[in-house]
């Protein structure tokens, strides 16, 4: 078996300081991770958080992820009347924040693990 070159394997890092909203430093858009600054690629916690989102996107066949993400956000925004609280309670974010410190998480993560974070 031959070893794949790392450039053939997502995520592909794109540095785009102008694209991300104020207060956000990264965003996962399969197969890319958009970063506000290049040095953030060395932030293991942040990169694991974004890799968890990439896995969530893949298992929902990418586009439906954004629909579910937006619908859950709108539902939570209606409930909390506060952007930050709504964002932090999105099931995908709750899973990513809960496991962003565990480097082994993606190797042991069950399929559709985000479902247990739906509130
Ligand atoms: Zn996130």
Image (spheres, rainbow, N blue to C red):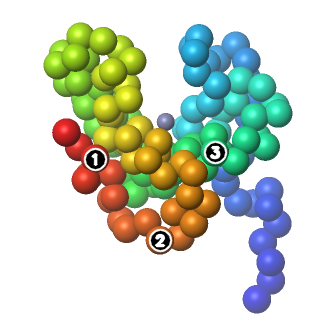
Circle 3 sits in a helix, a strand or a loop, which is it?
Answer: helix
Circle 2 sits in a helix, a strand or a loop, which is it?
Answer: helix
Quadrant of res 74: top left
Q: Report the residue marked by disc 3.
A: 45
The residue drawn where x is 51% and y is 63% is 105
Neighbour tally class for label 1: few under 14, some 14-19, many 20 plus, Cα within 10 Å: some
- Tag 3 near tag 1, CB within 8 Å: no
Q: Report the residue marked by disc 1.
A: 117
Mark 3 and mark 1 lie on one chain; the one further toward the N terminus is: 3
- Tag 2 near tag 3, CB within 8 Å: no
Q: Report the residue marked by disc 2.
A: 108
Neighbour tally class for label 3: few under 14, some 14-19, many 20 plus, Cα within 10 Å: some
Q: Marks 3/1: CA distance?
A: 20 Å
Say if 37 sits above or below 63 in the image.
Answer: above
- Tag 1 near tag 2, CB within 8 Å: no
The residue drawn where x is 44% and y is 47% is 98
């Amino acid at each position: 078996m031959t070893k794949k070159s790392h450039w053939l394997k997502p995520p592909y890092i794109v540095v785009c300081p102008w694209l991300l909203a104020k207060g956000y430093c990264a965003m996962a858009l399969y197969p890319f991770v958009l970063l506000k600054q290049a040095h953030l690629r060395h932030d293991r916690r942040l990169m694991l958080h974004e890799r968890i989102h990439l896995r969530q996107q893949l298992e929902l066949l990418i586009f439906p992820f954004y629909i579910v993400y937006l619908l859950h956000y709108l539902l939570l925004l209606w409930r909390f009347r506060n952007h930050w609280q709504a964002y932090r309670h999105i099931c995908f974010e709750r899973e990513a924040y809960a496991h962003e410190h565990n480097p082994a998480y993606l190797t042991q993560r069950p399929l559709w693990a985000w479902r247990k974070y739906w509130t």
